[in-house]
Image (cartoon, coloured by chain):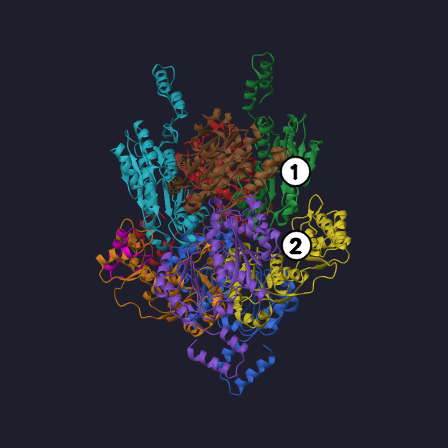
Chain colours: A yellow, B purple, C orange, D green, E brown, F cyan, G blue, H red
């Protein structure tokens, strides 16, 4: 969107010729910035209710840096996922206040106030090895404006650890269950609660886990109703879905 | 739960020795009725917020009839899915007011008032062959107490059909996308809306659809954030998740 | 053939009581009866500690009848699995006291006293649709000489049903867990008990259960130690393994 | 083909004893040069209408260098795909004017005039990470004598980016759609245009993308007619098919 | 599209206020007729250059009949694929001049002149069992306005049968190769010709053909360039792609 | 091959202008009879050393009858595999002396002397349910001119039954091992003998046998050298390979 | 469990207010120590009858070190599996008497007396490359309190090597069979013995072994009864199951 | 052990020249040398007709060196496959005359005369990248005592290169076809020749070749009879089978 177009629209709002809701509608469908190798969609945040997201995997460091720079200059909060340490180092050179959450492999560049944390999201893991994926979900959900609690290493092999945490389950509006291997935790949680459960299979395991396929199939076949599944290791996707749900609850 | 136990609990409430919330808590964790081949969980409805559900596939007709009879005698609304015509005929002999929705393969036995329809659920299909699964989702969501709208045959091969329906998309709190073959509709819808999207792959297709695997993988890999996936052909599961979400919005 | 037997044979040769060709014949492993299309191994029962077993699937009715007749004439108890009603009808014509357990699809022809029931085997199922496989396991284990208890429909979607049965779990020496769909029950049980757990995935389910693959992978990846898995729907195999284990305990 | 044979053939043409079409026919079926580890088919270019192609993956650098050298000495334009930087360095030592397109991993050695660019090929990608495959297609199509336009990062998650480019779609004779993850872009484009669409699934993604399987299956099941699919990451193959098509249009 | 809208548009053309190309553009993006269970896209034919297509598999006979009736009343030629004999019988009751091609399982209802046959399409099969799929392709291509030749049972196990037909290969603009089992014919043909090759794997075979997977993978990995693959058994899809290609050549 | 061409060739031989070996060479590469839906290769028998083979699966009964009639009229012995009883009934109407081997699902029409049985082929099965595939192999090998011995139901679960048959193993030139389920018999036999072993996986089994995949993979990974594998249930293919091998030995 | 709670419980036992069995029951269901990233279950050893186990794969070295330190301070024997050399080096800095079994990739920290070796476990491998997995099983079983014998490289390709070891088979109470490639050894051993057999497929092999899938499927389809299967390469899991079984025999 | 040998042994016992315990020892199958981690079978060569083979993959360098040393000291020719350069370097320190064929990754230590080359084996490849596997086959077949000819890079994409080599095909007794990607060469060769064809799929390719799965399936489904398949990349296995076949022909 050229700045002329934007200026014109805002003037119309200013002069009362366009009311706010109509302007909002226009802004939601406006175009994007074309970098050649990428088309930046500055208004997606508006449409989907969360910050600009850059999925770093498969992009060169130079591409990531350029994308983040443009977004940040447009005053958007940026959430860059699947970012290695070397990417963060490069981002820092153009964006000093970028923050890196190493375990989650996430870079955050905050701009503006940020939303008042409204939703209540609980992130649960079956084991310690699921932490990286869980943190990708947790940090993403926080940046999107949710309160997040964590309940880690409560897999079904020692199910009494899970039952100890039931109070925390009642607090949540949405529960994200992160589990590899047999993925059984999603079914057990799904059978215990009435809130929506988002199941994230992880590639944790070996042999017949087939890089997360076992957990994925187990979760898709959950005998408990009310469970939605995202891609293997897709912590960010779980957070995005959780955020879409919590926005319903507090808006 | 024996009726003695139930009576005792209610007397305590009546006499003010137990307040309502505490009673509710107790009722949620109380046991079930044991038929030998099945353990009926009369309080699951309370815990999960929807009617008693009987999944008929894999059960004999005699088992289904006995289960429905017991549930109905406990004054629960019953939703029996994957029920063939011959099962319905048998159910009718013990339960005259049972209703059969043939396309959805669902038997409904209504008891009590039913919830005030609160949630707004939109069910979308890519093609005409996806209707049976879509109706399983739609009827289930209605029985659980939601308003449901249908928008069928808007697959991406003729994408202008989809864009005509955008007003209906804005109405919904949750959108269920039902699609077989390439499953691409889930990604397109997911990219257009800000509400939670529940994707249901169907076994519609042939050859390399591998009974719904193609659609399932496509949906799990959706490049649009905010999409949760349920099992192939699992219309009921989509409805259960949608209901868990809409309950957040209107409660 | 024990080495005592071998030594005895060689001494007979040495002392001239057995000529060389006769010894040669004997030295071939212990014999069997050759029907052309099948080789009956009358001594397998001795070696493996359970009755003669006939796996009917893939055999013609005529073949099954002939095999059972020969075995029964040798005074062996016979256990015929995967037998349809029409096979049983044919078997009855040659073997009047044959008994048919319809749900388990098993024909039993008892000969001799049978073992004193020694082992304690518990068979658990996740759902009602798993009963056929569970009964194949239960009936087989009984014929092999074990006490069997059944605990059906205690899947993790309503996990309080499971916890009610913990006393029965303490009774057992071996626990057979029969579950389709997500197969999660095997992990939950495996985490609760110290006895050996035998997991039997079933083909119960649809869509991404892929005829039992989901449950199979889930069980193989169980995060609880002490779980051994058999083939999908292989109730008999679970009983055979359970019997091999209980024989250790009471012999 | 020995130069004697070639000379003889050309003299026959020169002297009118062999007309041009007959000579062309002969040239098309003439043999190849045998290097022992490879059989160079100098006339394939004639038969298939594009330059000599060397697929470097799986060949040693020494083998690639020898093959390119022989081809270049026969005055053929050479297109070497899947070539790493180290291969290019080695090729340069024998062939100074070789050019390396790093992103596409292609080495080009131009000989002769090259065809007049006739076809119009549009290469579209869903995301930035698909660029390497897209450039393999684009550069290959150019070397084969086509005009190529690029339209990158227009995936269905932000479908308005795609609709902005519809003019460019009208220009093309063939459209190559390069997409990983859900591969949904192929179906959307296939539903919008009337030209042939060549779909290239990429291995971009993670988890249940299974190295491009999800995109491959999605594309094979495209609900839009007129879509042909090539192997995962096979940018060159898409260009070869596009070229075979455009040759029909302008010849 | 309401007839009012259509009338208005045509009047504008008539009165010179809208030129023909602009009208054509408008007609291409106009809406469709909504039957509730299906949305008929009367203008798709215009956009994609072939008749209205009804994919019968997964639709009830009543749905197919209603769809064909509506399309035929709009004076479109209709091509209904995957139609059983019983569907044809029902269609005849509303549409007397419908024609059924049994081997191809196609119903054709011709309306209007039909295009002048312009393209030249050759359909080749490896074996006799591939005929049903080949005829789906051949009949579809004919209805779309192409000349079609057939060359059946020339699989690579007797490759001299193939070489006998090379003249017919030279005639074609596009070659459709239909093969099951090893799918090797696609590579052999792809290596012999310079025209575009469309490969259709079939589910012909048994065992490790895995319902066409072997042929599909073989074709996707074709070592010959210029081969595009469609779904297993997708004769219609091959015809649609062939038609999109031949339209380039003769328009 | 037209009869004119054949006559001409034979006259040349007769008159001494063509010697026998040259004529033989010509006959091997001569063409076939074209039925439209099939191209009969009357000389394949000469090239491959066995009778005309008709694979009935996927062909209509009418097609099979016509093919067999033509072949039989050319005085070829015909071997029709995968033939149901209804096909045989139809074949009998045109070919009275056709013979049906029901278990093997093979029709044989003998013409001429047939080869002197030269090769020695042993067919071994793991179980009784493998008999149909084994008989397809055995009968095919016999018709091709081999002596065949059978050794059935010697699977590794009772390995002493196998060791009893070692003399028969020494007799054979080639051993065909037919086994489903775990396919382990191929490895055991491969480790015991020095002759070539042809392994035929069968679809016998259930659950994780995945219609023969387990046996197929097991056989391909045989730790014994000298084992070649054919397709699942491909008894005929095993016979053809065995025959190619025994021809080396006795020619 | 806070030390206060533990002290209180022990005082009750001491003063006779709680008898030993009741105390044992309480200890089995008591909670765990929460490290944030892990929840240590100090009483699992009691429940499952073996030492504290740390699965190192997927955990950071720092996490492993902290977990081992806490466990060791609670005076538990610790068995850490899948531990690389660098993990061991780090563990040594906090726990001097830790022992590393390199081939098995196991760290052992012994505390207290350890159980009197009661069970008799035989570990068998098909080949030399299976040793790492076999040693994980053997060392684990020893630490759990079993006598272990090893019988390596007795695969079925040279089956006489196996028959030489039959005496050792009679000694064992449980037999663990470790095999990759065709996995056939499990079936052969299962057919020879009457004890429970635990089959461990390994990822040894290449090509169509698909990282152990071939051996896994072969073992699941074992035609010998009495075989339970664990995950690919899961030596520890086999030991845990073996230990659960031997505890039945000697307790 | 031949039955002559057995008879002789029994006569010695009968005549008192051999006492019972000594006979018992001998009756165990012919021995091998036990290294603990491996059991060397010095008589396998005798049984299978080829040199001692060491499969190096998965063994430590130290293990390989010790095994080769023992074998070589027993005066056996040794063939070590899948051997890296570093393994060869270590072997040289104990065995100076060891020879390394780098491309084939084979170490050969010759002892004794070696067999007179009798068999005639042709090794054919589709492409240059298949050379490593082809050379493993060729070198192995040579060491086993066969004449070997090579015909490389004759894949079906340029099928005239293949037809040029038909004379060489007539020379061979067995033909080994090595091909990756579509594996189509095996079917084409199988259709042209009457000798046994051994097909070796290779992992050459990318994307939907799935590490050789596409070629494997294609070869198993070959429409040409007389083709046996070995594991992906298993050049040695092909040579062993070829050798077993040629031994029939010249012995």
Letter of the chain that mark 1 sits on in the rendering:
D
Q: Is residue A95 above or below residue D17?
A: below
State whether residue G245 is above or below residue E142. below
Which percent across, then down, holds residue C159? Answer: 48, 69
**What percent of the width, then of the height, locates residue E101?**
40, 35
Q: In the figure, G74 relative to C7: above or below?
A: below
Res C191 seen here: yes
In the picture of the structure, the residue carrying the numbered disc 2 is: A47
Q: Residues within 10 Å of mark 2 (few under 14, many from 20)?
A: some
- Residue D151, located in which quarter of the rendered image? top right
Which residue lies under the disc numbered 1? D168
- The answer to which of G96 and A5 lies nearer the viewer is A5
Q: Which residues are magenta?
A: C60-86
Judge by depth and name the residue closer to the eye, A131 or H75.
Answer: A131
Question: The N terminus of chain B is located in which quarter?
Answer: bottom left
Element under disc 2: helix
Q: Is residue E109 left or right of residue H161?
A: left
């Amino acid at each position: 969107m050229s700045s002329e177009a934007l200026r014109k629209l805002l003037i119309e709002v200013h002069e009362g010729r366009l009311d706010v809701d109509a302007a909002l509608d226009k802004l939601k469908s406006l175009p994007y910035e074309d970098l050649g190798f990428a088309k930046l969609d500055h208004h997606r945040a508006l449409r989907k209710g969360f910050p600009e997201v850059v999925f770093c995997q498969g992009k060169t460091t130079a591409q990531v840096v350029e994308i983040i720079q443009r977004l940040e200059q447009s005053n958007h909060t940026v959430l860059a996922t699947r970012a290695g340490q070397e990417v963060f180092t490069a981002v820092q050179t153009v964006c000093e206040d970028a923050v890196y959450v190493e375990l989650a492999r996430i870079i955050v560049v905050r701009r503006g106030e940020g939303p008042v944390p409204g939703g209540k999201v609980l992130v649960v893991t079956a084991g310690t090895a699921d932490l990286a994926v869980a943190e990708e979900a947790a940090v993403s959900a926080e940046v999107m404006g949710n309160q997040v609690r964590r309940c880690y290493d409560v897999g079904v092999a020692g199910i009494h650890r899970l039952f100890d945490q039931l109070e925390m389950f009642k607090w949540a509006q949405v529960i994200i269950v992160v589990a590899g291997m047999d993925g059984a935790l999603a079914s057990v949680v799904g059978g215990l609660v009435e809130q929506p459960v988002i199941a994230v299979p992880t590639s944790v395991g070996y042999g017949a886990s087939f890089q997360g396929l076992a957990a994925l199939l187990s979760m898709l076949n959950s005998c408990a109703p009310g469970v939605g599944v995202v891609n293997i290791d897709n912590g960010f996707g779980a957070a995005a879905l959780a955020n879409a749900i919590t926005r319903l609850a507090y808006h």
